[in-house]
Image (cartoon, helix red, strand yellow):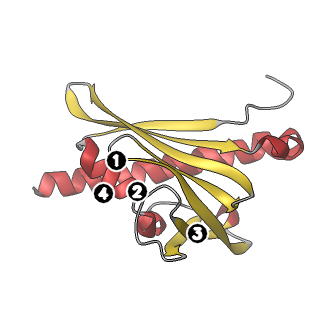
Amino acid sequence: MPLIPPLTRSVSVHVAAPVDRVWDLVSDVTRIGEFSPETFEATWTHGSTGPEVGARFKGHVKRNGVGPTYWSPCTVTVCEPGEAFEFSVGLDTNPINNWGYRLEAATEDGVEGTRVTVRLTPAWYNRAYWALLGRLRGRTNERGMRTTLERMKAVLEAEGAQQ
């Protein structure tokens, strides 16, 4: 195992739902509280009302699901409907990390749907933090990303079954 764990972490899940429905969910930051084990609410800020590059929002986070609790400012950095939704966390001039969802139509075990990948890329200047706490926090992040995607999958597939 490398001395410093990889900075970028990602998790992928296949969802039996079309790309456009998955896109609508992952790009609606106001729904993240339904899915994330750490971010329990988010709201658009600075006049933003929906996903577009430069749109601002803030996420209300309970670190590790137990605390401390704080608000994180976020800025949408990539907004390609049906393909990618990414945002930086932190101040515009000094973001801490970047979160992103990538979507692609995919068939798995004969089921058509969407492969959703969520990725976390910390800023380069966080290398010291990752050298000290990266393995533990990286595993926590991966578990949280998987939980978030599995919860999204459950909602999307239940909605699809009702249609």
Mark 1 vs mark 2, CA separation in Å: 9 Å
Q: Nearer the viewer, mark 3 or mark 1?
A: 1
Q: Residue 48 appears at what percent x and percent y?
A: 47, 72
- Which percent across, then down, holds residue 44? 49, 73
On screen, residue 136 versus residue 24, left or right, reads right
User: CB under 8 Å between callouts 1 and 2?
Assistant: yes
Task: Give the SS element for disc 3.
Answer: strand
Gap in Å between the C-alphas at discs 3 and 1?
21 Å
Give coordinates of residue 13: x percent, y percent.
41, 38
The residues bearing labels 4 and 2 have C-alpha atoms spaced at a distance of 15 Å
Residue 31 sits above or below residue 102 on the image: below
Which numbered disc, 3 or 1, marks the residue that appears first in the sequence?
3
Q: Which residue is mark 1?
A: 81
Q: Amino acid at mark 3?
A: Gly
Distance from disc 2 to disc 3, alpha carbons, whole Å, reads 14 Å
Secondary structure at numbered mark 1: loop
Which label lies toward us, 1 or 2?
1
Tell me if label 2 and label 3 are in contact, CB under 8 Å: no
